[in-house]
Image (tube, rainbow, N blue to C red):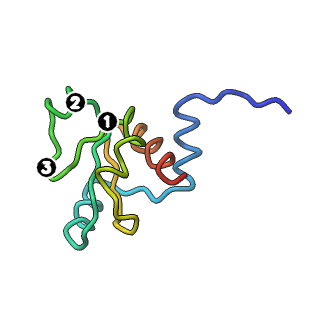
Amino acid sequence: MSQTLKTIPELVAEIRSTMRCLSAQEAKAELTDNQGLLIDVRELAEVAEKPVLGSTNIPRGVLEMKMLELHPEPNMPLYIHCATGARATLAAEQLKR
């Protein structure tokens, strides 16, 4: 059985169809109402240029290695942020696994 490589937009669209995706405003409202954790998966230079208040920066490339160390509570809701949503989607899928 042969599989075709997918473009990043195709892969992100496929993953998003199985994920709960929120706007920034919806996420902010939920974070105000509960004890969730906002994770910014952008690179350090991006975060320095345009920080997101209240977020924890864990770049996408080290997310799996740092997640348990920085976020040991498995029942706390996670909100994943990036510049376009693509890295956040891929990061959320990896964390879901």
Quadrant of the rendered image containing residue 46: top left
Disc ID at residue 59: 1
**Residue drawn at the location 42% of the way across and 42% of the way down:** 64
Residue lying farthest to the right in this orientation: 1
Residue at 33% of width from left, 55% of height from top? 79
Q: Position of residue 5 (x, y in %)?
A: 67, 27
Density class for disc 2 (Cα within 10 Å; few <14, some 14-19, many ≥20) is some
* Mark closer to the observer (2, 3): 2
Disc 1/disc 3 C-alpha distance (Å)? 16 Å
Label 3: how many Cα within 10 Å (few below 14, some 14–19, many 20+): few
- Residue 63: % across, % down: 38, 41
Asked if residue 27 is positioned above or below residue 52 in the image, the reply reads below
Q: Which image quarter holds the N terminus?
A: top right
**Circle 2 is placed at which residue position?**
44
- Residue, disc 3: 53
Q: How many marks?
A: 3
